[in-house]
């Protein structure tokens, strides 16, 4: 029975890798929509990918918020290579609760890995005036420089509607998402099923175009409810590594 399970996972990974046309796919057993331990396994799997993708030195690891990346942070342990790593949030405030914010996750990762970190203190829902003055702060500018020089990005993917609700999105934006058939969200960008940008949340940090120059991009997202979202997001960044679960994988593959 064990052999069969191993074999099945491999097959699913290969099929998914072809279907999504991404560089590498890892599938953990189970569905994180159903069981919380599956998300922990996503975290564990993502950590091993991170370690393998580290550059020999000067690693700058940009991370997003969300419960999946929080699970990655929980699984990190001190490691000779990670000790030298610098963790930064990928983007500024995107409307998450503190425990799921990129800043929080970034500091947890640094603590667990015994690396260092820099934070980006840009809250969400700022007036344009406050925003403009904040981003010209020297401290913010220096963190932005690091983000733009990231060597690795570890990010979550959300279902568009779920994320919009979680962020208390204004009615006019909700309408824009609906009219534009947004199905996915990553980095504060909302995408339609073809990977086209429907909307972008106002904040600073990593821009989508920059992903093409970052050596390692690792997406961590599972649960059958994220099938559409994952498929849409993967159309944006074909060079990615995807760490997902059986629930999402089977839903994507069974749609033909
Ligand atoms: C958010 C990120 O914090 O987490 C989003 O800003 C991402 O880009 C989302 O889609 C994923 O959340 P979760 O909890 O489903 O991992």
Image (cartoon, rainbow, N blue to C red):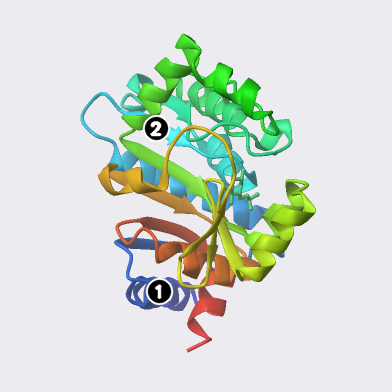
**Residue found at the far top of this picture:** 138
Q: Check the image and report above or below for 44 versus 114.
A: below
Which residue is disc 1 drawn over? 16
Nearer to us in this view, 97 or 178 = 178
Indicate left or right for 161 with 27 as reference. right
Does residue 66 sit above or below 225 in this rendering? Answer: above
Element class at badge 2? strand
Q: Position of residue 120 (x, y in %)?
A: 54, 22
Q: Marks 1 and 2, Cα distance to the nearest angstrom? A: 26 Å
Q: Position of residue 221 (x, y in %)?
A: 54, 57
To which quarter of the image does residue 165 belong? bottom right
Residue 137 x, y percent position in the rendering:
50, 12
Q: Position of residue 81 (x, y in %)?
A: 31, 27
Of all residues shown, which one is farthest toward the front? 129
Residue 61: image tag: 2
Q: Is mark 2 within 8 Å of ligand 1?
A: no
Tell which of 16 and 97 is nearer to you. Answer: 97
Relative horizontal placement of residue 170, taking residue 150 as reference (left or right): right
Camera-side mark, 1 or 2: 2
- Mark 2 crowdedness (10 Å alpha carbons): few <14, some 14-19, many ≥20: many
Q: Residues within 10 Å of mark 1 (few under 14, many from 20)?
A: many
The residue drawn where x is 42% and y is 76% is 12
């Amino acid at each position: 029975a064990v052999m069969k399970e191993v074999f099945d996972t491999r097959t699913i990974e290969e099929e998914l890798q072809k279907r999504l046309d991404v560089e590498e796919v890892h599938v953990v057993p189970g569905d994180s929509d159903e069981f919380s331990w599956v998300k922990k396994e996503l975290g564990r799997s993502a950590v091993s990918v991170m370690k393998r993708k580290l550059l020999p030195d000067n690693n700058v690891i940009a991370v997003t918020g969300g419960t999946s990346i929080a699970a990655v942070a929980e699984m990190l342990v001190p490691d000779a290579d990670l000790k030298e790593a610098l963790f930064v949030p990928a983007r500024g405030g995107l409307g998450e609760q503190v425990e799921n914010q990129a800043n929080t996750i970034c500091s947890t990762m640094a603590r667990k890995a015994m690396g260092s970190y820099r934070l980006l203190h840009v809250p969400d829902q700022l007036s344009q005036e406050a925003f403009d003055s904040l981003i010209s702060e020297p401290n913010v500018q220096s963190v932005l420089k690091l983000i733009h020089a990231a060597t690795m990005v570890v990010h979550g993917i959300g279902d568009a509607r779920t994320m919009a609700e979680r962020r208390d999105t204004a009615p006019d934006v909700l309408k824009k998402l609906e009219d534009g058939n947004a199905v996915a969200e990553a980095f504060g960008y909302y995408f339609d099923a073809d990977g086209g940008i429907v909307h972008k949340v106002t904040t600073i940090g990593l821009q989508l175009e920059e992903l093409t120059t970052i050596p390692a991009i690792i997406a961590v997202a599972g649960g059958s409810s994220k099938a559409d979202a994952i498929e849409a997001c993967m159309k944006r960044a074909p060079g990615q590594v995807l760490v997902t679960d059986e629930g999402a994988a089977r839903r994507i593959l069974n749609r033909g």
